[in-house]
Amino acid sequence: MTTLGERFADAIATHDRDALSALIADEVDFRGLTPRKVWDATDPAGVIDAVLGHWFEDTDRISSADRAESDPVSDTRHVSYRFQIDNEDGPQVAEQQAYYREEDGRIVWMRVLCSGFRPRD
């Protein structure tokens, strides 16, 4: 069985806005850090706009997603995922580390750190 964090990574990889929305609580405390910007959101639409509207656009074809969930730290879970991406800039790789808390099967708090897109060897 996949965890909520793994399903979050899978929804990003498939650019599935509906699946992503279903994973996020109506009121969420979300913050993401990319190489150039801090992103904040308080609802599913804001998270989806950041993640699929800016971080991973429709032209970013994710060919594979490696993901791993670690043991929880008290009430906080951790998931890491690495995407192999092809886009107009060529082959890329991006990795994210996410910490999250859940209630009633949805993410209510999340912090994401992103490596940014890096050229793939």
Image (cartoon, rainbow, N blue to C red):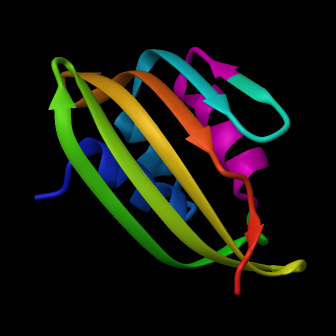
119 above or below 72? below
Image position of 49 (left or right of 87)? left
Image position of 3 (left or right of 90)? left
36 above or below 44? below
Residue sitting at x 67%, y 32%: 33
Image position of 42 (left or right of 73)? right
Residue 20: where, in percent of width, then height?
46, 45
Residue sitting at x 81%, y 31%: 37
Seen as rendered, the residue at the extreme right is 89
Q: Is 51 in the magenta?
A: yes
Q: Main secondary structure of the magenta part?
A: helix
Residue sitting at x 66%, y 76%: 85
Q: Quadrant of residue 51?
A: top right
Which residues fall within the magenta stretch? 40-57
Seen as rendered, the residue at the extreme front is 121
Q: Is 26 in the magenta?
A: no
Seen as rendered, the residue at the extreme left is 1
Residue 74: where, in percent of width, then height?
16, 18
Q: Nearer the viewer, residue 49 or 90?
A: 90
Q: Quadrant of residue 106?
A: top left
Residue 81: where, in percent of width, then height?
44, 58
80 above or below 109? below
The number of numbered discs placed on residues in the rendered structure image is 0
Task: Give the position of the C terminus as an image quadrant.
Answer: bottom right
Task: Give the position of the N terminus as an image quadrant.
Answer: bottom left
Residue 30: where, in percent of width, then height?
54, 21
10 above or below 28? below
Q: Nearer the viewer, residue 112 or 56?
A: 112
Image position of 71 (left or right of 48)? left
